[in-house]
Amino acid sequence: MKKKYLLTPGPTPVPAEVLAKEGMPIIHHRTTEFSNIFLKVEENLKKVFFTNNNVLLLSSSGTGAMESAVINLMRKNSKAIVLETGVFGSRWGKILQGMGFSPIILKEEYGNAVSLEKLEESLKENPDVLAVFGTLTETSTGTVNNIKEIAKLVTKTDAVLVIDAVSGLVGEEFYQDKWGVDVVVSGSQKGFMLPPGVSFISMNEKAWKMVEKSDLPKFYFDLKKYKSKITEGQTPFTPPVSLIVALDESLNLILKDGLENLFHKYKKMGSIIRESVKGLGLELFSKNPSNVVTAVKSPDGIDSGKIVKLLREKYGVSIAGGQMDMKGKIFRIAHMGYMDKFDLIIGISAIEMGLKEIGYNIELGKGVKIVEENILSCNGCCSD
């Protein structure tokens, strides 16, 4: 049996304590026992989102929460702006188009962050825009967007700002209420250190007022139904009971470490990985790199998909390749969730061996040395 190492930007590794909770006998969800767990989870999620808003739990991947945001906020014939810096920014546009809208797409060259100037100009040209949809960390390109400054621009208008924080929450600095972000969606399989299956959505009063005016058809993703059940510690439909019990444990671990400490940890891990891959003669893809995943340009003449496949099948190390237009051109190394300093060493050593085997002229151990030297100099800041 080959041991497997997961360094993908979702799903991420799950701690043993969290897995153990999933393995417990299932409880019935319409009970006081479940409601007590649910209410504790609700309060702890608010701490992670840095919000006083309710955080609604949906049985879906993060895309389900994204779709729920669209159908609960938008109205027929209304306008929306989409900030596209990669595949997942593009997904906002596809969801809106699927609902019959023609969103205003502000697309940046992949690898670049959102242009604040373009957004400000578009908001002035379209004062009747209902919502602006964007992404905290664009997983497909390893790019982080300046949500704090984006929020300052949108807050001056009647529009709501809706942010996909599926990969960024817990790993990147993010403060929903302090920054004035109206709606935030996220998912369980990244920073929350859980398997896929639960998504989250948090909305402020400005957004809930918009929900009251929404005239799009909805049933399962009708967020008013979820909000009405919060105080009971319940959901309107059957929840993923075992995942929520496990979420309770993962939130305990996250809050025990402290969000600010985790922000610092992932920032340092991202810095170490970037320095290491540059030391190998490789080029970063993003011009504004995130702290949760690093995108690296594949060497000339080498299909990144071959690197990813070789590492997974021969060495048991899973990283991610490029998506859509970036397929074959980049590979991505995650440093989020339940990962620490030795995951960095494993990931870089596997990449070195894989590149060497494929034919890239590389000095084995050079990248690993950079990782090790940085770890020793940071006094355990990358420890779990």
Image: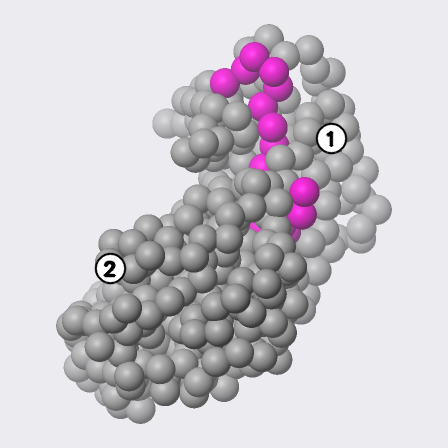
Q: Is residue 290 above or below residue 216?
A: above
Judging depth in this view, the residue of 229 and 244 nearest the camera is 229
The residue that appears at 52% across and 25% down in the rendered structure is 329
Q: Is residue 311 above or below residue 80?
A: above
Residue 157 sits inside the magenta stretch: no
Q: Is residue 323 left or right of residue 211?
A: right
The residue that appears at 77% across and 33% down in the rendered structure is 370
* Res. 46 in view: no
Which residues fall within the magenta stretch?
287-303
Could you tell me residue 324's position as x and y percent?
Answer: 41, 34
Query: Residue tagged by mark 2?
Result: 99
The quadrant of the image that shows the C terminus is: bottom right
Could you tell me residue 16's position as x and y percent?
Answer: 44, 54
Task: Identify the mark at residue 278; answer none if there is no mark.
Answer: 1
Judging depth in this view, the residue of 311 and 168 nearest the camera is 168
Q: Residue furthest front?
A: 125
Q: Amino acid at mark 2?
A: Met
Could you tell me residue 146's position as x and y percent?
Answer: 63, 61
Q: Amino acid at mark 1?
A: Lys
Q: Is residue 276 left or right of residue 328?
A: right
Judging depth in this view, the residue of 72 and 61 nearest the camera is 72
* Res. 320 in view: yes
The residue that appears at 44% across and 85% down in the rendered structure is 206
